[in-house]
Image (cartoon, coloured by chain):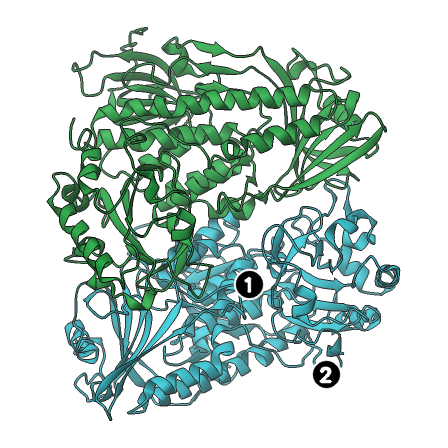
Chain colours: A cyan, B green
Amino acid sequence: MTRHPLAMAPYSSPSTTDLLIIGAGPAGLMAACWASQYTNMTTRIIDKYPSRTATGHADGIQSRTLEILESFGVVDPIIRKGVQHAEMCFWGYDKHTSGITRHKMDSAQTDKSRYNMVLLNQGIIEQIILDYLGLEQEGRVEVEYGKQAETLELLEEGEDEYPVVVGVKRVGQNGANGHCSDVETIRARYVIGCDGARSWTREQLQVPMRVCSGDTTWGVVDIAPITDFPDIRQSCAIHAGDRGSIMTAPRENRLVRFYIYPKGDGRLSVEGKDRSEVSLDEIVGAMAKVMKPYSLTYKHCDWWSIYKIGQRLVETYRPHDRIFLAGDAAHTHSPKGGQGLNVSMQDTYNLTWKLCSVITGEASPSILDTYELERRPVGEELLKLDTELVKAYEQDTSVTEGVERVRGQYIDFMTGTGVTYGSNDLITGKKADTSVAKNIKIGMRLSSYPVVGQADGISMQLVSRLTSNGAWRLLVFPGDLREPSNQSRLANFANQFNEQPHLPCLHKDLKSNRCCPLLETIVVHPSPRTSVNLLDLPEIFHPFDETWGWDYSRVFADDGSYGEACGHAYARYGIREETGCLVLCRPDQHVAWLGSLGDVEALDQYFGPFVGRK
Amino acid sequence: MTRHPLAMAPYSSPSTTDLLIIGAGPAGLMAACWASQYTNMTTRIIDKYPSRTATGHADGIQSRTLEILESFGVVDPIIRKGVQHAEMCFWGYDKHTSGITRHKMDSAQTDKSRYNMVLLNQGIIEQIILDYLGLEQEGRVEVEYGKQAETLELLEEGEDEYPVVVGVKRVGQNGANGHCSDVETIRARYVIGCDGARSWTREQLQVPMRVCSGDTTWGVVDIAPITDFPDIRQSCAIHAGDRGSIMTAPRENRLVRFYIYPKGDGRLSVEGKDRSEVSLDEIVGAMAKVMKPYSLTYKHCDWWSIYKIGQRLVETYRPHDRIFLAGDAAHTHSPKGGQGLNVSMQDTYNLTWKLCSVITGEASPSILDTYELERRPVGEELLKLDTELVKAYEQDTSVTEGVERVRGQYIDFMTGTGVTYGSNDLITGKKADTSVAKNIKIGMRLSSYPVVGQADGISMQLVSRLTSNGAWRLLVFPGDLREPSNQSRLANFANQFNEQPHLPCLHKDLKSNRCCPLLETIVVHPSPRTSVNLLDLPEIFHPFDETWGWDYSRVFADDGSYGEACGHAYARYGIREETGCLVLCRPDQHVAWLGSLGDVEALDQYFGPFVGRK
């Protein structure tokens, strides 16, 4: 571990923060979304660029990322401004007949998620999150642009409450503002380094990366294409035999994203070159050759680049007890699968609630080990997928079949909905009795089905109730409450719940934001909605607040409704009514534990090792 | 007409604006939404209060208002933050049995609109629109709070380009800011007076109001109720015989809106009183009596008021050639139907695009007559509905049946979806051949059904394509394009279209915002989507722009799709394939004209009288 001495002058006096996020790209902004939910800790986020991404870079937002953004309440403008990825079109070149093949497929994943992939410029995505942080989260966490981390000092554990000392320099200000000093020292409890493929954080700690492949170079262009190609407003994989292959994706306004790969007949020889050696017209010319017999020209280019990148995975996601790497700082790969932004945001979505729980004293630091345990396998899988896609694109013939096959095989990974964390301190994989709900997978994020609010008759997606505010949720499926035996089982469950050493405290401890306990109990019953009176249920399902009265938001009927097609949640989850079912979801909606209504003690034991311990 | 001399000093030098909106309540903000679409004119909006509504006031947003907000792209946060009005519950008191009756009904209007009513505090609605104006519309129109109109001078027509001269005073600043003068003169081309029930604008012009009923007084309370009443999270009409009647509506967070009416046994004698004479506890106490045998108390009150208001309708909506009244300035009534905010916003939604079209020279001032012709009947109907509701609430018995009957009778008016404008210069009611589309009603806003984008395969609501940006839309329904006869009919239509005196200009004239012509041609065909190639259709359906290429956004298939249940639009609109069908929608989505594909000349004649003439 390197130690960089702090330049003592002219640094201003050190300021402290519980969490320092280095880098305000998608991964950093996701971390900021989480941190802004915790009003009882401090967070700073710095970025060396003077402002958000303007154009270009990532543009594909997969289903799971949209679900996550929905959990913060920030998905709507992304859906409205972006382009839905409704259909995928494979164009091939049959070398036997010399003919063109065209094959369309539905790219919606309606059985896996309530969101399809959306295509939108990374800059707009960043702006939407910045607006959310400013307006909805009242600027509790605000990106400090134009601040570059320069030095890193690590104090001994126990030496200081804020052992990570980062020297930061203002950049791009040209000394215009006399009131601000040019340099500043930030002392942090924890640091997330999500500062991109050339991560400064990673360099400071000299973290080695495993190189899985040599660098390849590819061209990327955002233009308003002028073309008679009939599928220009859909996502396409186009392979024109020796003439090379390209990928396209329709975008907001009339833009289209094009990727071109160096394989082919070498007419676009970008291999090993960078932007200074290749012109935009050269790239578009090479793409036009692939698209023949259709024409392709352009007048407006929004952004273009030549990328040189290899498959790399960092050797450790946690190079220091207090410092974590995430996003491109941890893994780099080709853009073929539309994964970069997504896996990066999902890294910090996994990490930050854990960090915040530790910082605020809700959980013991031991849970931080699960970050690498959970996210490294995802990084590994990402590179595997990338390798397969690279291989498929490198095939001379039937590339479209190859790409389609890989996409089919990895679709649950690509959408992010199938990512399942293995057994660890926060995922009780092995001990659990999964027969109580045969379609609920421990370690995976809970699937969502519409249910009806008991109190208001409003149909909604069950998982929409599991907003990302730091609360754990215990979903209780008691079976039909018209059965007296189910009623008394539910009453017994509530009594036992209140007698456990940890559960009642978790349930009552309010976080600093009103009405949000650490653990919320939610009941979903399959009885006709009108047969149940909410206040007749055990009190843990409608806790009383002296000011705000009863909580009416925790009881749902799996019953037919006026609106969406409700009434199938028990069947879809495969819940056995004989045993009833308890589903514990972590603050990130992943299923942590599964049991029957009698397993209250085991549930309490789940929390024992990490709750309330420092 | 009064003439108020301008105080010459210390007014600052007059500034000019094309449009001055007085009042930034819901009606004024809706006018601002429209005006901000027009980048080639200037708009100012002033409000005498120091900031937006904080709490209380209106809170019901009906289907049509949500559709309108969607057309500006501003509906999502309202849906997310508000409470859906899913179910209505009628509680009655049977005086024969002395028992309580309870009757629930679906309050969704899924066959009429894609939006149900939403309940949300007016302040939050205003904030959402302010954020939209600032962020999405780049602050082109910005509310100037704390500016009170004081004097009005009207110059002779022809004397000045800006004949309405308004003296404005800053209020509530206490002279703290030395740089701003306290008073200012604004010279405007046109003025919208939407400054509420006690409208200053109306007073200046001494516009009489027709008094339809004497003042009644009612109490309104926003509290977090503490109650065991089982339907507290639904909209209820509760009538407890002699004990009086209340209405409730669930709201954001744990708030509930309560209305209490003065009828009953007089225990709450608010009649004729104002807020200084009645306490909140007195009102809640009276409500608690109505809710017996259930309990009702509270700790948190967000807002409460005693309102005294009568049914009044202004004698003219346009008291001066250049000045229009809208919203509460034009009509006042009880809150019983949840109409106030909605009819007010719909007033300015009707008016402002017309004003902006005239100001920017797109249309002749003659179209401004249609404002009163269209909106006065709505005001009249509003008072009729209110009278019926008041009567229903005044009945001693079976009030719930009465209220339910009135609601059933007026539901299309209450949701705003049924409002139909009569024949006038902009609505060709009598001449049109309506048999070509028997379910499309001239003068009514077009109903929406999902269709599939030809180019992208994305299913969307057809009317979502008719965004409020000032463009007229000609929807062309050509019938199945696999039929050669339909193909040639469509080609003939396009040829004729291009030969008319007005249509081709309207179609080509781009407004200042890119890609938005005055008239957009859109085609909806019922052929299988894959049987049609977009660029094979006549050029008016995919106009070419030198920079941005072809417009791929104007062709839709009424075909099955991956997503929503598409493929039923022809059937739902009742379109006769033998004739095909042309539907002309105004910028406000109301159907202006209807004809067959051969009626191009008549279509052109529609525009003749008002297009391009000053």
- Real-space CA distance between mark 2 and mark 1, rounded to the nearest whole angstrom: 34 Å
Instruction: Look at 40% across and 47% down and name the residue there.
Output: B573
Left or right, B268 with respect to A188, comes to right
For badge 2, the amino acid type reads Lys
Left or right, B266 with respect to B370, comes to right
Instruction: Look at 59% across and 12% down and name the residue there.
Output: B215
Q: Is residue A211 visible?
A: yes
The x and y percentages for residue A25 are: 42, 65
Figure check: B247 above or below B562: above
Question: Dot 1, how many residues are within 10 Å of its Cα: few (below 14), some (14-19), or many (20+)?
Answer: many
For badge 1, the amino acid type reads Leu
- Classify the position of the N terminus of chain B by image quarter: top left
Of labels 2 and 1, earlier in sequence is: 1
- Classify the position of the C terminus of chain B by image quarter: top left
Disc 1 sits on a residue from what chain? A
**For mark 1, what is the residue?**
A19
Disc ID at residue B513: none
Toward which corner of the image does residue B224 lie, by quadrant? top right
Instruction: Look at 45% across and 22% down and name the residue there.
Output: B379
Figure check: A300 above or below B494: below
Disc ID at residue A430: 2
